[in-house]
Amino acid sequence: MASPKDLAQRFPEDFLFGVATAAYQIEGAAAEDGRKPSIWDAFSKMPGRVFQRHSGDVACDHYHLWESDLDLIKSLGVDGYRFSIAWPRILPEGRGPVNEKGLDFYDRLIDGMIERGLKVYPTLYHWDLPLLLAGDGGWTARSTAEAFADYTDVVVRRLGDRMDALATVNEPWCICHLSHLYGIHAPGEKNAEAFAKAVHTLNLAHGLATRAARAVRPDLPMGIVINAHSIYPATQKPEDKAAADRAFLFHNDIFFSPVFQGTYHPEILSAYGDRMDIRDGDLETIGQPLDWWGLNYYTPMRVSHVPEAVDYPQARANPPEPGPELTDIGWEVHEKGLSDLLKELYARYRLPECYITENGACYNDALVDGIVSDQRRIDYLEQHFGAVLDARDAGVPVKGYFLWSLMDNFEWAEGYSMRFGIVHVDYDSQVRTPKASAHWYRDLVVAHKAPR
């Protein structure tokens, strides 16, 4: 086990360390200062959708506690903070009248970050689609991509002068696959046609937003955050290897090819193209060069061939076999998946520089006598920092790392039952308590900044 100092010294001096959150998961204040509901406000209140019908109504009450939360981030010594802007706060109906109080909140938040010496890394969309847009079809409707561009223009005009970089969308796989095909996240659809339309609408929204942001601030570094999957065949049988290749196209290439190459793979077009509503000029819009991109990684995907499956890719993601270490949410710990994935993506595509925009682990260690001893999270982080270094040694231009998450929060379909934070949150009192992993991470960052 390497010490934080030894690990820190292996990163270059300009490597950025940060923490990450998302608006709906921490802000609360769901009906304050002009904010209207998002699809997650509605989804979380439906029976059987979210653990015990938990919601983000209050969450971590960051909307009111943001100043002390920024002090907390500053105390960790990190360089930057990755957060998301809530579309329903800015344009409560999705488009139309601008809610100035919503912009005022992010004005204060960003100014507070700058006052504390924190770099500003916002994301425009982290899943909280304004509910009224769902009535028009949500991400299955092309009009949502156009509305997203309008929203981008409003945000960048008001806040873009103080951003260090801007991401358009967070995890298109979750927005499309998890939400429109598997029915696990809002809006909870299980429909191949809805999925196909959502994929192209989401990709188009990214392109339109990138263009809108650059029209206002050409110097603002633009990127996208993708939770690409590290995919392995369940066995070395030829049929499982072929299934893994198809799964890569279905889970990863379906975003990487249009965004970074301006194309869809022929297999994707064959399976879904007639349902995607691809129009002239769309792929040029989607495939604009980016300044950077972000990778979110937690666990590998191991797949096997499913010959009886009707739909492409005829591959099934298998649950972890008994044996490998699992986090408390049931995800396999496999740090090599991170380095393998980075190397494979840079071998396949011409990509700009990269940030690890999310990485972390769910361990539900309790607060005991004022202390949370989460050694398993520390071990996870140490192993994955090693994987980042391995990828860098192989020539992958990883420029920074944002740990997920700053604090325990609303974990989507899992509600408040799962804890990813390096800071413990008592949801009744809103008291924040840094865990052992927070002290470990602070020591790592401090050591990284020390003279060499």
Image: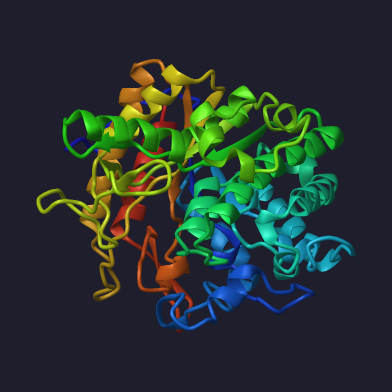
> Is residue 371 placed above or below 344 in the rendered structure?
below
- Tally of marks: 0
> Is residue 120 placed above or below 130 in the rendered structure?
above
Q: Which residue is outermost to the right?
A: 97
At horizontal 40% and vertical 77% (from top left) the residue drawn is 51
Q: Nearer the viewer, residue 446 or 284?
A: 284
Q: Nearer the viewer, residue 219 or 179?
A: 179
> Is residue 14 placed above or below 146 in the rendered structure?
above
Where, by quadrant of the figure, is residue 23 drawn? Answer: bottom right
Using residue 27 as the reference point, say whether residue 338 is left or right of it.
left
Q: Nearer the viewer, residue 161 or 117?
A: 161
Using residue 131 as the reference point, say whether residue 380 is left or right of it.
left
Where, by quadrant of the figure, is residue 407 drawn? Answer: bottom left
Point out the image quarter for the C terminus.
Answer: top left
Q: Position of residue 43 (x, y in %)?
A: 56, 74
Is residue 168 visible from the viewing direction of this image?
no
At horizontal 57% and vertical 58% (from top left) the residue drawn is 70
> Is residue 224 placed above or below 71 in the rendered structure?
above
Q: Position of residue 102 (x, y in %)?
A: 77, 65
Q: Position of residue 224 (x, y in %)?
A: 60, 38
At horizontal 58% and vertical 53% (from top left) the residue drawn is 193
Is residue 275 visible from the viewing direction of this image?
yes
Point out the image quarter for the N terminus.
Answer: top left
